[in-house]
Amino acid sequence: MNGYEFIFAGARLTMLPSGALWWGEAKMLTVSDLHLGKSERMARRGGAMLPPYEIRDTLTRLERDISTSGAETIVCLGDSFDDLDAAENMHETDALWLTRLMAGRRWVWIEGNHDPGPVEFGGTHLAELYAPPLNFRHIARPGAAAEISGHYHPKASLSLRGRSISRRCLLYDADRVILPAYGTYTGGLRSDHVVLEGLMRLETIAVLTGPDPQPIPMPRSLK
């Protein structure tokens, strides 16, 4: 399977080009921060009018990753919907598409800060998931180990032939993995932000998303 493979807490993991995380031994696919319905939520609150295609784009990518990997368990690491109303207001066609993707699979919704609580879909709703040896939660916990989380939407820049390329990225060190945002309309937090620098070890690797995921030392601020 195309992607970047690494060992974390004894588990062999692969970051797919999309930013999804594949754990082959457990047949588990993990994604974070889909933020489905962001365009609807922004319009509802009088914000910028974004083209309302982000749900279909995100679900297309997710369906492809599920099909390619053959995943039997899907873990959504929180902020799967931009808010609870976005889940309730989801177009019937998109809701049926999501329901079809869930059919026949174990589907775990981890609670996020945008969607704290059950939504109108099946599956298992948890604050956190422990799947030995890994701990899955939405927001990284200082001092935690073997932790996989999301929330921060990390991104990093790479200089290539005199050009700076900025992409979403996965961050990992000996203690934790922070996944990139998976949703189409999601921004990013630079890896040299004080919050990410405070969470990640000096030897952290940033893996940039894209057709050929690129690992680089996590860019840090100049101090």
Image (spheres, grey):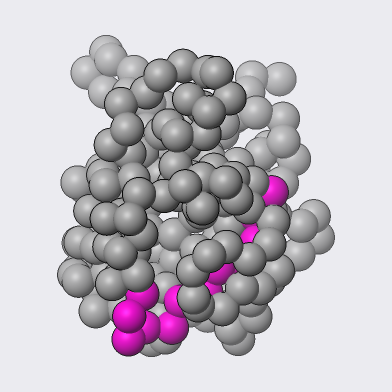
Relative to 67, say whether 168 is above or below.
Answer: above
As for residue 112 lying within the magenta part, the answer is yes
Residue 5 in the image, given as x and y percentages of width and height: 34, 65
- Residue 203 seen in this snapshot: no
Relative to the observer, which residue lies in front, 143 or 88?
Answer: 88
Residue at position x 35%, y 70% from top? 99
Image quadrant holding the N terminus, namely bottom left
Q: Relative to 40, is 59 on the left or the right?
A: left
Relative to 74, say whether 175 is above or below.
Answer: above
Residue at position x 18%, y 70% from top? 68
Relative to the observer, which residue lies in front, 150 or 46?
Answer: 46
Q: Relative to 174, is 165 on the left or the right?
A: left
Question: In which quadrant of the rendered view does residue 97 lie?
Answer: bottom left
Q: Relative to 103, is 86 on the left or the right?
A: right
Image quadrant holding the C terminus, namely top right
As for residue 13 lying within the magenta part, the answer is no
Magenta residues span: 102-113
- Residue 120 seen in this snapshot: yes
Residue 89 in the image, given as x and y percentages of width and height: 47, 47
Residue 92 in the image, given as x and y percentages of width and height: 33, 55
Relative to the observer, which residue lies in front, 186 or 125?
Answer: 125
Residue at position x 50%, y 77% from top? 123
How many marks do you count on the picture? 0
Residue 186 in the image, given as x and y percentages of width and height: 46, 35
